[in-house]
Amino acid sequence: VCEYDVLGGLRDKPVEVVRAETNDILIPADAELVIEGEIRPGEKTDEGPFGEFTGFTHGRNISPIFRVHCITHRKNPIIPFCVEGTKWYDGAGGAVFGMGSGWSEYVADLGINVYDCWPANNIDAAGGLIPCYIDALTPDEPLRFAHATWSYKATFAGMMSLIICDANVDPTDTRDAFEAFGLNCDPRQQIFITDKDTCNYNLVFFTEAEDRFKYKGASRVAYDATVKFKPWADNIRT
């Protein structure tokens, strides 16, 4: 499938393209910045350490070398790159929104009535802590929802921690999610922690470096902050 065909379908109009300066690849005509070059098979070198969005630095990697042949850009281009070494920034939670459509369909196909997910914009939420909102149909649905989320292809390596709220909690105001967590989550039985058997990745700095780069040894946690089906809930509702 041609990516430009997909983009044109989403935009409801064709994507204008031009040929690159140094090769025959077609690129968007209105691109802010274009870096052309080549990656030669087997050519690698040390990379790093350098700062990450988490505010920490990870160890050195062996990465492919990209040989730059040409750089073109618009006048005063807008460059929306990650600002290394900082925490929350405009794009930190972008991946959450991008994967939301496929993820919600996947969860819905399992019979779970998911309402929304929203990155917690007062902390680093790029896969860190994600408030989610469901309309549970059974008492075990928050746990089923957590396992479904951690098994989806676009979320299994991220979404380390979930706050699972009722659908009537405002997803656009994460203060409501934290309020639900503080008032409704019983630490004796409503915190679900996996064994150290889930996918890891190299930016999870609180795990061992050897495990991070082998993508193993991570855990996930879900906080059930829902009220629905809780035996004590009817006693306090007014």
Image (spheres, rainbow, N blue to C red):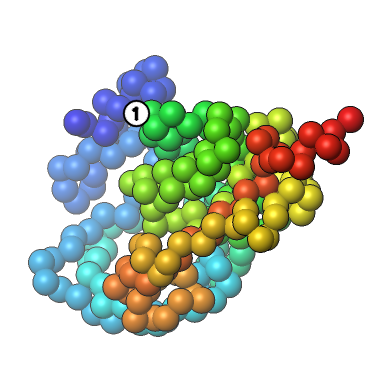
Residue at screen point 55% across, 68% down: 54
Q: Nearer the viewer, residue 177 or 76?
A: 177
Is there any visible trace of residue 107 in the rendered image?
A: yes
How packed is label 1: few (under 14 Cα within 10 Å), some, or many (20 or more)?
few
Work out which quarter of the rendered image holds the C terminus and state it: top right
Marks counted in the figure total 1
Q: Is residue 38 above or below residue 179?
A: below
Q: Position of residue 232 (x, y in %)?
A: 76, 42
Q: Position of residue 127 (x, y in %)?
A: 51, 56
Q: Position of residue 154 (x, y in %)?
A: 37, 46
**Left or right of 87: which side holds 42?**
left
Q: Nearer the viewer, residue 77 or 226?
A: 226
Q: Nearer the viewer, residue 168 or 155?
A: 168
Q: Is residue 63 above or below residue 33?
A: below
Residue at screen point 28% across, 39% down: 27
Farthest-out residue, right: 238
Residue at screen point 51% across, 46% down: 143
**Left or right of 95: which side holds 152?**
left
Residue at screen point 79% across, 50% down: 183
Can you identify the residue that label 1 sits on? 7
Farthest-out residue, top: 12
**Left or right of 214: which side holds 73?**
right
Amino acid at circle 1: Leu
Work out which quarter of the rendered image holds the N terminus and state it: top left
Q: Position of residue 56 (x, y in %)?
A: 54, 76
Q: Secondary structure at mark 1?
A: helix
Is there any visible trace of residue 81 in the rendered image?
A: no
Q: Is residue 216 above or below residue 5?
A: below
Q: Is residue 30 above or below residue 122?
A: above
